[in-house]
Image: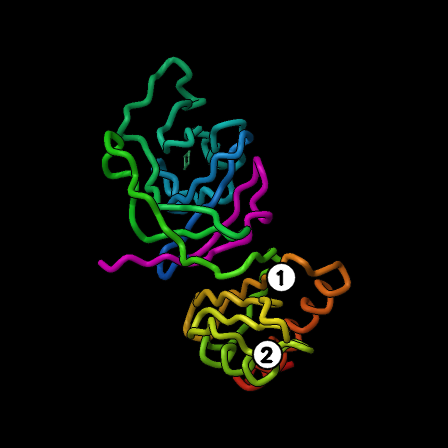
């Protein structure tokens, strides 16, 4: 299986003591951050009876399943079974975990499992290097293909910016006249016609410029979805 690393969410959308649902290819994921800030990416399925863990609750340094309340540590091991408080759960009661790392305000997840051998340190996960200092703006889901969103953004760049040299199918940057990065799009394919678009701006952008960039991205969504035949 080839290694895949995708930008699944903005870091700020997963603050301390929060769990969200995310997707990586066919993988349904629960991304959660403990109260002290430990970030984890797990299969979105409780090892007990299969409840989605993204419906659960963060309790300090543990994630509690909504259904029967089993508590899992940040290492993925079940530590508390409320119906059997005297029981020490076996190590086999553990979640399926994937590599996760944060960079430039983005949470990147890989399809590489990290739970298979807890005696070995997980292999370091290296996300793509973003060439400039950037700040996250927002994420938008667009009902269009990666190619359609890519083409639409290239044909309708943000005001006063031009397509930069750092452009690929899933990564577009737009530079100002001085060559500084003003905007960046990371396209995360969810399905053939559904893309999660993470928008980043140059770190020097002020609030008004960030708002303008946010509106620009909404206009890209409207154009791309119209081209894809999605009713307005
Ligand atoms: S399904 Fe999660 S604790 Fe039972």
Q: Quadrant of ligand 1?
A: top left
Dot 1: few (<14), some (14–19), or many (≥20) neighbours within 10 Å? many
Give 21 or 181, whichever is nearer the viewer.
Answer: 181
Residues at discs 2 and 1 in contact (Cβ within 8 Å): no
Identify which residue, 184 or 54, lies in the foreground: 184
Q: Is the N terminus in the top left, top right, bottom left or bottom right quadrant? A: bottom left
Side (left or right) of 140 relative to 68: right
Q: Is residue 104 left or right of residue 108?
A: right
Query: Dot 2 lies on which element?
Result: strand
Where residue 100 sits in the image (x, y, percent)?
40, 46
Any magenta on residue 15? Answer: yes
Q: Where is residue 184 drawn, in percent x and y?
A: 55, 67
Which part of the image, by quadrant, shows the C terminus? bottom right
Q: Secondary structure at mark 1?
A: strand
| Residue positioned most to the right | 208
What range is drawn magenta here? 1-23
Residue at 28% across, 26% down: 91
Name the residue beneath numbered marker 1.
Answer: 202
Tell me how far mark 2 sits from mark 1, CA to CA.
14 Å
Q: Which residue is mark 2?
A: 162
Q: Position of residue 197 (x, y in %)?
A: 53, 66
Is 220 contained in the magenta span?
no
Q: How many marks?
A: 2
């Amino acid at each position: 299986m080839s290694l895949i690393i995708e930008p699944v969410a903005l870091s700020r959308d997963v603050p301390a003591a929060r769990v969200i649902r995310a997707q990586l290819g066919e993988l349904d994921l629960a991304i959660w951050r403990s109260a002290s800030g430990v970030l984890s990416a797990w299969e979105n399925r409780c090892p007990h009876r299969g409840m989605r863990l993204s419906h659960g609750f963060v309790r300090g340094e543990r994630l509690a399943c909504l259904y029967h309340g089993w508590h899992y540590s940040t290492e993925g091991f079940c530590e508390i079974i409320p119906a059997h408080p005297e029981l020490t759960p076996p190590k086999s009661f553990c979640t399926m975990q994937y590599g996760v790392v944060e960079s430039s305000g983005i949470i990147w997840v890989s399809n590489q499992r990290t739970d298979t051998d807890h005696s070995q340190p997980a292999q370091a996960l290296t996300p793509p290097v973003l060439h400039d200092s950037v700040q996250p703006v927002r994420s938008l889901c667009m009902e269009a293909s990666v190619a359609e969103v890519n083409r639409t953004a290239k044909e309708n760049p943000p005001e006063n910016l031009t397509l930069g040299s750092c452009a690929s199918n899933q990564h577009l940057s737009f530079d100002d006249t001085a060559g500084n990065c003003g905007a960046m799009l990371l396209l995360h394919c969810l399905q053939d016609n559904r893309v999660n678009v993470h928008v980043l701006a140059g770190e020097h952008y002020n609030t008004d410029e960030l708002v303008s960039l946010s509106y620009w991205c909404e206009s890209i969504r409207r154009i791309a979805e119209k081209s894809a035949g999605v009713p307005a």
